[in-house]
Structure formats: structure tokens, C-alpha cells
Image (cartoon, grey):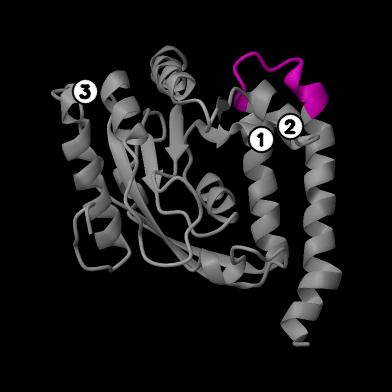
Amino acid sequence: MSLGLLRAIFITDPLIVLATVVMGLINIPVSFFDHDGRKQIALARTWARILLYVAGVRVRVEGLEKIDPAGSYVFASNHASYMDSPVVLAQIPVQFRFLAKIELFKIPLLGDHLKRAGHIPVPRDDPRAAVKTLGEAARAIQQRAISLLIFPEGGRTLTDLQPFKEGAAYIAIKAGVPVVPLGLRGTFAILPRGSVNVRSGHVTLHVGEPIPTKDLSLRDRGALTELLHQRVGELLGEPSYTQTK
């Protein structure tokens, strides 16, 4: 057994669990006095930074100057690890909310935080309800001046970038906000799919040029999804290829 794995089992993982429980407990009373979820997102951002620090994860961000912290966006990222969300949350200073699978809302403390902070549950087995959720997400962006983080691949991947679902493009067009491609490199090595042991390492977060949507209609969502897929692939250094590959 390697020294890194021993550190993960006996030091890193217990500290991450402890930080999650403590921040979750703090979030509960804060949520009763936080009508717009901003204080809870600040707590979540602190939690994310603690996780990265405890795990020994160093993040380099490229292209952050392309983002207006006061703006609203749909961020679309590749998804290789459960550490993806903490990395993005810790590094990009906007008012994030997440589209998350509905099962996460049933987890103690985490589920309570997701509900009270205004994150949006996605019913994966009900297509009609899922479409309704996309419309609700677009309205939330417009009414609450927030941004959304979405993983268009639909789940964590083990290989190269997978085809994108159209949800990110649909929401961005419906809300009339730019969609921003993100490329995350290195998170799979930090916490691979199927593992519960967080390792130290280096991560690079590439922020692409925001893609405007104000002149687009929902009929354009397929083309926008294709473009978004290409841009994320370029940020990851992968050769360009189409969704049908």
C-alpha cells in the first residue's frame, strides 16, 4: 500500500468528512436567515476551498478574466470526478447554483443544503419533468441573477469527452445568457470514478470564451451544443470531433 493511499485513508478522507459535517451543520441555521442563498453559497465556497487544501490539490486557472463576477452564465464543463464541482466553485467567483440529480437531495446535510440554497433537482427517469426543470432553471437565472454549472455529458466519464446533452444550450438560450465552456484537467487523478480516496495533485481549470445566446432560438440548441462540445474539447487539448463520433 502506497504512502499516498495511506495518507488518503487515515488523514485526508477523515478531514474531508469532518469539514463536510461541520460546514453542513453551520449551514442549517444560516439558511433560515438567507432568503436568496448567497450566504449558503459563500459557505459552500469555503467548504470547497477547505477540501482542496486538505487534499493537497493545487489549482491553476486560465481565462478567469473572461468572466464578470456580477454576470449570469451557464457554465458547461467536462465531468471526470466528484472533485470537479468543488474546483469550479472554489475558483470562479459567481453566484453558482447547480443542476444535480435528485438522489443527492436525499443525502443528510448535503440534501438540506442543496434545497435551502436553491439548487435545482433533476429527475433523471422522467423526461417530461426533466424538460420542465430546464425551464425552471432558465427562469431562476433571469429572476435571481444567478449562474448555473452543468455537466452536459450527463455523468462522470472514464475516457475522452463524451457527446453532450442539450440541456445547457436549452437553458442558456431560454434565459438569454452566455454559455461558458470549461475544461477541467487533472481531477480524475485526484478522485477517480469508483474510488473514495482523495489524492493530492495538480488541476488546471480552463475558462473558455463566453458564447452569446441572445440572438438564438431554441431551434439552435443542437448547433450550440455541438459548438460547446467542440470548445470544451479544445480546452482539454483533444482533437475536434462531432457529437456523432
In primary-sequence order, the first of circles 1 and 3 is 1
Location of the C terminus (image quadrant): bottom left
Check disc 2 and report its element: helix, strand or loop.
Answer: helix
**Circle 1 is placed at which residue position?**
103
Task: Identify the magenta region.
Answer: 28-38
* Disc number for residue 218: 3
Residue 172 falls in image quadrant: top left
Residue depicted at x 59% and y 17%:
36
Residue 211 in view here:
no
Q: Is residue 37 magenta?
A: yes
- Residue 7's x, y, as percent? 79, 76
* Disc number for residue 106: 2
Please tell me how crowded label 2 is: few (under 14), some (14-19), or many (20+) other residues with Cα within 10 Å.
few
- Residue 54's x, y, as percent? 73, 63
Please tell me how crowded label 1 is: few (under 14), some (14-19), or many (20+) other residues with Cα within 10 Å.
few
Q: How many numbered discs sit on the rendered protein?
A: 3
Drawn side of residue 241 relative to residue 84, left or right: left
Name the outermost residue toward the left: 215
The three-letter amino acid code for the residue at tag 2 is Lys
The three-letter amino acid code for the residue at tag 1 is Glu
